[in-house]
DNA sequence: CCGAGGCGCTTGCAACAGCTAGCACCCGCG
DNA sequence: CGCGGGTGCTAGCTGTTGCAAGCGCCTCGG
């Protein structure tokens, strides 16, 4: 719906904006929750494009893989369109990533860990032996610590906790 | 931090003290909640309605809690409309169930599609430097290949995806 | 007896998701 | 130079989402 948080992020600049009139107090709080949620997912398109170029796949190719049209995928990547969950799922399949990852990026799934889900992904990966899993986790932790030490001002990117209203 | 159950209960009980204790089917409905029927073909609407009546919340009340209109929720529950992920998420919040559960019911989240998002997670992880990212990906690929070689019964997964060459 | 107010549902409408067709730009090849 | 083919983006359309009004039903309370 017309969440106020969307234009707060300002990236989209759609031609029209609309002021919501909320009746009930309960509805207000809920709407606030929702706006926060959708604000988190401002950059799904960026994430998709990132993943796509990282995988060296052309826009048209991914569109075909995901079963969507190329123009639409283009618009999705640039944030002009807000893809439905189905489309998101299809895109995730095309990118060979889990739908959950995309949903988290889209802000419609709360992150279950403070950690980026790399750890969860490694833990859940059935293609790894226990030993290898352990090695990867260990290595990952080391890298993260190193990175954090290098940039102590870095904050966790999830839950920006912005309060527009 | 997340809205606890007392919120909904409070709302419900304050508005509706006169909610008569119906004949003891309550325990059964609660049990139904726990069972969480795993039929994938189940309509989301049915599931939502199930959960709603189990929580003894009226359609309008849930609509208010979820921040959607009551007619729309009605149509969703009867399967006439296919709610978007945002709405689904909002409804899940209103029902105090996890969004994942609803997504599964909606068929837009495959039951734990395991491995593929490890690569994406590593690629997307903001806590890694590019070099470390490359190392992890390389190592992961190696491990996966090794694992696959050890178990030839496994049908070839989509390992050759990224090919950082 | 009848208005107030709860319930769920049906009806029309605004907005948007997503597609098909076509554009502009860049390459390699004859 | 011209042409086929690659990239991504713009324009116009259709179907659906999601909402505001309004209906019929039932229960209170005056």
Image (cartoon, coloured by chain):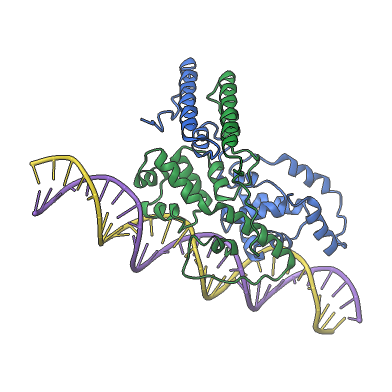
Chain colours: A green, B blue, C yellow, D purple
- In the rendered image of this protein, does residue A46 appear above or below residue A1? above
- Decide which of A60, B124 is in the foreground and name it: B124
Residue A20: which quarter of the image?
bottom right
> At 63% across and 49% down in the image, what residue appears?
A159
In the image, residue A117 lies at what x, y percent? 59, 37
In the image, residue A6 lies at what x, y percent? 55, 61
In the image, residue B99 lies at what x, y percent? 64, 47
Locate residue B79 relative to residue B35 in the image: left or right. left
The N terminus of chain A is located in which quarter?
bottom right
> At 53% across and 38% down in the image, what residue appears?
B125
Task: Please say whether residue A40 is visible from this viewpoint.
Answer: yes
- In the rendered image of this protein, does residue B10 appear above or below residue B153? below
In the image, residue A105 lies at what x, y percent? 55, 47
The C terminus of chain A is located in which quarter?
bottom right
Q: What is the count of numbered marks?
A: 0
- Decide which of D8, B27 is in the foreground and name it: D8
Locate residue B158 relative to residue A10 in the image: left or right. left
Locate residue B50 relative to residue D10 in the image: left or right. right
> At 81% across and 53% down in the image, what residue appears?
B6
> At 80% across and 60% down in the image, what residue appears?
B11
Task: Please say whether residue B16 is visible from this viewpoint.
Answer: no
């Amino acid at each position: 719906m017309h969440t106020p948080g969307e234009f707060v992020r300002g990236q989209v600049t759609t031609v029209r904006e609309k002021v919501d009139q909320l009746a009930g107090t309960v509805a207000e709080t809920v709407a606030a929750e929702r706006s926060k949620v959708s604000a988190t997912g401002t950059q799904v398109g960026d994430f998709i494009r990132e993943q796509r170029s990282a995988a060296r796949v052309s826009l048209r190719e991914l569109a075909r893989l995901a079963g969507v049209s190329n123009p639409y995928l283009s618009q999705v990547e640039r944030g002009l369109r807000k893809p439905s969950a189905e489309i998101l799922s299809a895109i995730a399949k095309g990118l060979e990533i889990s739908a959950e990852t995309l949903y988290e990026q889209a802000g419609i799934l709360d992150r279950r860990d403070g950690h980026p889900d790399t750890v969860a992904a490694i833990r859940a990966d059935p293609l790894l032996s226990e030993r290898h899993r352990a090695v990867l986790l260990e290595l990952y932790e080391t890298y993260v610590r190193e990175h954090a030490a290098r940039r102590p001002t870095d904050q966790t990117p999830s839950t920006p906790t912005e309060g527009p209203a």
